[in-house]
Image: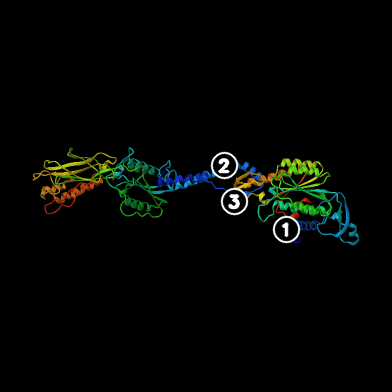
Amino acid sequence: MTFLHPWALVGLTAAAIPALLHLLERRVPPDAEFPPIRYLTEAERQSARRLKLRHLLLLILRTALIALLVIAAARPLVQSRGGGAGAGGAHEPTALVLILDNSPSAGAVVDGRPVLARLKRVARASIAGATAADRVWLMLADGVARAGSREALLATVDSAEPAWRRLDLTAAVARAVRLVNAEPLPWREVQVVSDLQRTAFGEGRASVPRGVGVLALAPLGQASLNRGVAAARVTDGVLGVTLSGTSGAGPAPLTVRLRGRTVGRMLAAPGASVPIPLPSVAPGWWVGDVALDPDELRSDDRRAFVWRGKRSCCRPGIRLSSVKRTGRSRRAAHAGGSARPGRRGRSRRRVSRASAASRSRGGIGWRTLEMGRGGAASAASSSLA
Amino acid sequence: MADVRRIDLLDPAEVARLGGIEIVAQGVVEGFLAGIHRSPFRGFSVEFTEHRAYQPGDEPRYLDWRILARSDRLFVKQFEEETNLRAMILVDASRSMAWHGAPTRLTKRAYADRLAAALALILLRQRDATGLITFDEAVRQVIPARVKTGQWLRLVRGLLDTPDGRGTAAQTALLHLTGLLARRGLVVLVSDLLFDRALALTALRYLRHRGHNVIVVHLMDPAEAELSGPPEVRFRDPESPASVVVRPRELARAYAETVAREVAAWRAACRRHGIAYHHVLTDLPFGMALRLLA
């Protein structure tokens, strides 16, 4: 059993109030003369056991009542043998959209287990409880609602991996609500299985019509400290690395590799932007990466960058952002996502297609910007989608 | 309708407001005798005194059939009883008797005094020698049984002169009584019976064994019959340092059962030994109580 508001369980301490009142009660009863006290003593002696039992039951009942109120306030979720919340041996036909948030943060490892594994377990339980009369969709970080048989959806859940996409939960819930609300089933529900990262909530609000239930299921546990490489950009032969992460996380070793060769090391803390000079290299495109020592969320510990070594220049190091606008340089500038340079228009379309294909595969998306004018090439930067 | 105006059938507390014990007792007795038209206590022999017009309720056996045959009118014969009954009234004057459950009711002692005075007046009017003993833990007043003029006032004064006592030891008083009642007679015990039943019964049984007719009037305030009060209260025994903290609402049923059991035990024990037992609540009109004794 889990609770939606586990902090409310603190109120369980209030269950001790009846007992404390009983123990601390020091009320002096009023005095009164009563001649037939012998009858009274006799009556009390005869009913002492019954009264004692009655008082005990009353105390238990009062304590239980307070405990039940507190537990009710904590909103318990009881997982039945047949499945997740709302599932079980028999339930009304339900239209259910299960949003499984497999965004990058789900790849974090907490207490030795990936968060995604826990989310998948909850999602599996919910889907496993579905019956033939239910309509069930599964929505992953890509925002696509997948309909299918229970077995197919379970297989999809099992095969889900941390995606490179951020799931906007607000938008996802809005879509899911529209979807289930269109179903003519007596019960309509959206279940959000997510680690509920703050960044997962987009702008605005998802309006939920009457009759549609939205249930958020998040694993318990403290969010672990995280460090990540937010940006890696080469400017005039210097690699600028920006780190992000949880405030309070200390510095961590940072390694810069160029074609597999370590060219720089330093310590950096989240929030810092550090310049790292790159060595002189032969002309041509160079691929490198910046890597932090692994932490619980490994997906943001490494970021790749590309760099074009200058053919012959006045100074060592190659500027990627100020490549002269020649035919070759233009082609080279477009070659960030495509290994084959082409002409300007055609190559851009190719890159766009490549980017789209890459996104659809869930891999690294490449963003291509408009080339600048006046001989200066715009920066072709890589970034994670 | 006429009965409602009879003083003996009014609420005892209202009757008590009419005046002292004498006035109340006389009023009660007048009403009582007018109501029943015959003496409830009779000696060993009676003498005819006069005729009286028949009234509904009169016993047919007292009809004078000769007058009926001659004049076709209904007359009943009235008798004057000889004074050969010796009656002794025992009034419990213990501390517990000076208690009432509500200010609108008489205390048990006040009720007992008025009842005893009325009873004595009836007996003395029948020319029965009547005496009085008041007692608490000891015998307080002893007025031997006489029939002479002024005896009733002596009895009333004896009641008034007996202050409220402390404890109750009925056995002592009853044993003392046996010495005072050489001849067989009537013994009326008016008490709340809040003492040891076995010891009191021993004495009462002894009186019965001596040939006395014994009547026990068990007085009880209605508040003693049904437990009530604040949610929690400490009840103190006025005759001892004993006290107990109870919640009247919780204990009411068990208490009522205990009282009923106690009354039943007294009734059974008295019946077993040929003793008349009457359970009287202090809100019962005096006339009704006297009728119980008749």
- Per the image, the residue denoted by label 1 is B15
The residue at which mark 2 appears reads as: A53
Residue closest to the eye, A65 or B105: B105
Residue closer to the observer: A355 or B263: B263
Q: Total number of numbered labels? A: 3
Pointer 3 indicates a residue of which chain? Answer: B
Splitting the image into 4 quarters, where does residue A307 fall? top left
Q: Which mark is residue B230?
A: 3
Give me the residue at 66% from left, 55% from top.
B103
Q: Secondary structure at mark 3?
A: loop
Q: Which residue is located at x 40 percent, y 55 percent?
A: A210
Q: Position of residue A24 (x, y in %)?
A: 51, 45
- Residue type at mark 3: give it: Pro
Q: Tag on residue A100?
A: none
Q: Secondary structure at mark 2?
A: helix
| Mark 3 Cα shell of 10 Å, populated few (<14), some (14-19), many (≥20) | few
- Check disc 1 and give the amino acid type: Val
Query: Left or right of A287: which side holds A115?
Result: right
Asked if the residue at tag 3 contacts the one at tag 2, i.e. Cβ–Cβ closer than 8 Å, the answer is no
Apparent side of residue A276 relative to residue B148 in the rendered image (left or right)? left
* Observer-nearest of B194 and B4: B194
Front disc: 1 or 2: 1
Q: Position of residue B86 (x, y in %)?
A: 83, 48
